[in-house]
Image: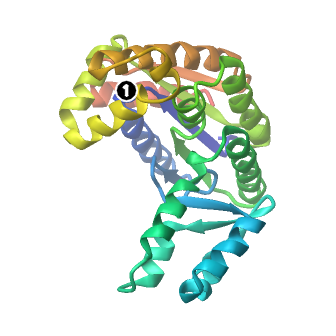
Amino acid sequence: MDTKLILVEGLPGSGKTTTAELILELLKEKGLSSKLFLEGNLQHPADYDSISFFTNQEYAVLLEQYQEIRNDLNALAFERVDGWMVSRYELHKRLGDRELPNTLSKKLSENDIYELPLEKHIELLADNWTRFRDNSMNNNDIYIFECCFIQNPVTIGMVKYGASSEVVMNYVNSLASIIEPLNPVLIYVNQEDLRTSFTKAVQERPKEWFDGFTEYYTKQGYGKRQRAEGLDGTINVLEARAKLEAKIYDSIKFEKYKINNSDFDLLLHKTRIAKSLKEV
């Protein structure tokens, strides 16, 4: 297998996580060294989760304002693209029983990578994907990434900021160019009925997940502009997202496969995945 990176994408409830886990299982069965990074993995080598960014000037002010944890911040912060990054998870872990000032907690959340202006966000992510590409060229591992190649750019670009299709497509295609030397493979998990698959996901997950998801999809960016509300409004935004992701999929030049998971038949789905990977 020539690829060093398998990207798993699809809409919420399509079965991305299951698909990524099955791919790992199949690669292990072949004796291939593989690493799986699901959505929300705090150690993700290309994406950022619970990471805050500050410009050099902002970071200097931060150190001045919070001198009681200055040494902790300096021990954890790492330099990136004319600024500094701080892992909130690592900071909380380092502080232990010591309390993080509320004002600092608020500032860290406001400066999350996925709360930054879109242009700066794209710059930072492109830098991180480039670092991942360069680092991964030096080992024999095959990486499996869930949702960070298409879903995350579409979510922050279209859903959060209401950016144009062109801007979002350019973002994803810039990432595609960066990882091209890894001979990536895109597996896009499809569902024939978006409403059914999303409603199934809602029923299977905590109410808090649905409430947060709906607020994110209807109270800002594209959804707010469309005056979307509740479950129906959220599904309308997802349908628009599906159309954009279809255009993005068509624009991708490297190896790619769409796999229909409407049956939610685990054995059948694994067989379909295995067939796609055989061609890689």
Which of the pair 131/257 is nearer the observer?
A: 131
Q: Amino acid type of disc 1?
A: Ser
What residue lies at 50% left-to-right and 51% top-to-bottom? Answer: 37
Residue 108 location in percent, x, y? 53, 63
Q: Decide if residue 34 is in sight here.
A: no
* Location of residue 204 (image quadrant): top left
Q: Is residue 137 left or right of residue 278?
A: right
Q: Is residue 4 left or right of residue 111?
A: right
In this picture, is 146 found above or below 261?
below
Which of the pair 239/273 is nearer the observer?
A: 239
What residue lies at 38% left-to-right and 31% top-to-bottom? Answer: 270
Say few, some or many: other residues with alpha carbon within 10 Å of mark 1 (under 14 / 14 to 19 / 20 or more): many
Residue 233 location in percent, x, y? 35, 17
What residue lies at 42% left-to-right and 70% top-to-bottom? Answer: 102
What residue lies at 47% left-to-right and 51% top-to-bottom? Answer: 28
Q: Quadrant of the C terminus?
A: top right
Residue 90 location in percent, x, y? 50, 73
Q: Which residue is mark 1?
A: 14
Q: Decide if residue 144 is in sight here.
A: yes
Q: Is residue 79 left or right of residue 23?
A: right
